[in-house]
Image (cartoon, grey):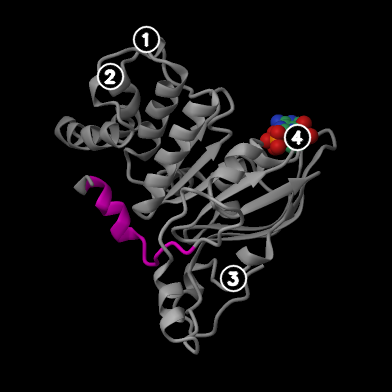
Amino acid sequence: MDSEFLVVESMSHSSPSVSPVSGDTQRRSPPVNAARAVADPAAKAPPREAIIGLHQVTKAYPGGSLALDGVDLSVGRGDFIFITGPSGSGKSTLLKLLYGEERANAGTITVDGYAVGELRGDRLAELRRRIGIVFQDYKLIPRRTVAENVAFSLWAQGLRRAEIQRRLGPALKMVGLPHKANSFPDELSGGEQQRVSIARAIVGTPPILLADEPTGNLDGNNSLQVIKILQKLNGIGITVIVTTHDEALLRHFAYPVVRLVNGKLFVPQSYAQPGSTDRRDRDKTSPQTRV
Ligand code: ADP
């Protein structure tokens, strides 16, 4: 594993402990806490730290469309979850609220210790550097090479050429595309373009990765490849949230699935765990109740 990406791992303070919700050939080894519980049934797993928290979040767009309706969600640091639901149920809106592209009308949102609703300017930019984003339609710059596309955000941040080069290699390696560094997007397949967009999302080593229908334009095989890359990133500590309405993917991977229906979010009981969503709460000893 590339040392660059171990930096991300060291940012993660808890081992991922995902509750499987369906049979899966991709199932990961049991979390450390679970292993301890088997050895000592009396031992209680400590509450895991939440990296994302939404409390009673409502979003109505101008014109009256209610996209999210009283949404509660807590995502543990290092988790991987799927958000599913029919088209128009609010999946993209939920992700946009997390990175401050849209603002909630009511409720509170905390991401990696930031109260998102209150962020403006530099503080919002700071939060966005903590979040990698992958879109269904890749959003690559057509007249730039793969390397330039991946490096773009680092240039924009003013990083030096040597530092950019240092980060570029591991990011492209992570998605299996070092040999395509000098290709242009239209010389790549859809699956490869999506992998470039994943490399772009993680080149700044963010602790959180949001992927909005990342497999929406891909066939079954490429979809699997993309989710496996996200799984690999999750394995080094990145918290991953993926929206999809592909039931086959949900069945294939043993990750918690939360469902949106008409803006209301349904969280499986197995995923409701204690945790704190607020940096100020992290040092307190009493556990927060997870919604
Ligand atoms: P999904 O990602 O599940 O398809 P969206 O979050 O895109 O759902 O949309 C949820 C609802 O909000 C839909 O009714 C959609 O029409 C509406 N919506 C989304 N974006 C806007 C917008 N910019 N202006 C007005 N309505 C919007």
Q: Could you tell me the amino acid type at mark 2?
A: Lys
Question: How far is mark 3 from mark 1, CA to CA?
Answer: 45 Å
**Nearer to me, 273 or 118:** 273
Q: Could you tell me the amino acid type at mark 1?
A: Glu
Compare marks 3 and 4 and give the one earlier in the sequence: 4
What kind of element bears circle 1? helix
Badge 3 vs badge 1, beta-carbon distance below 8 Å: no
Q: Which residues are magenta?
A: 4-17
Q: Residue at x 28, y 23 (%)?
A: 147
Q: Could you tell me the amino acid type at mark 4?
A: Gly
Badge 3 vs badge 4, beta-carbon distance below 8 Å: no
What kind of element bears circle 4? loop
* Residue at numbered disc 3: 273
Badge 4 vs badge 2, beta-carbon distance below 8 Å: no
**Nearer to me, 259 or 200:** 259
Question: How far is mark 4 from mark 2, CA to CA?
Answer: 36 Å
* Residue at numbered disc 2: 180
Instruction: Determine whether 157 is above or below 16 in the image.
Output: above
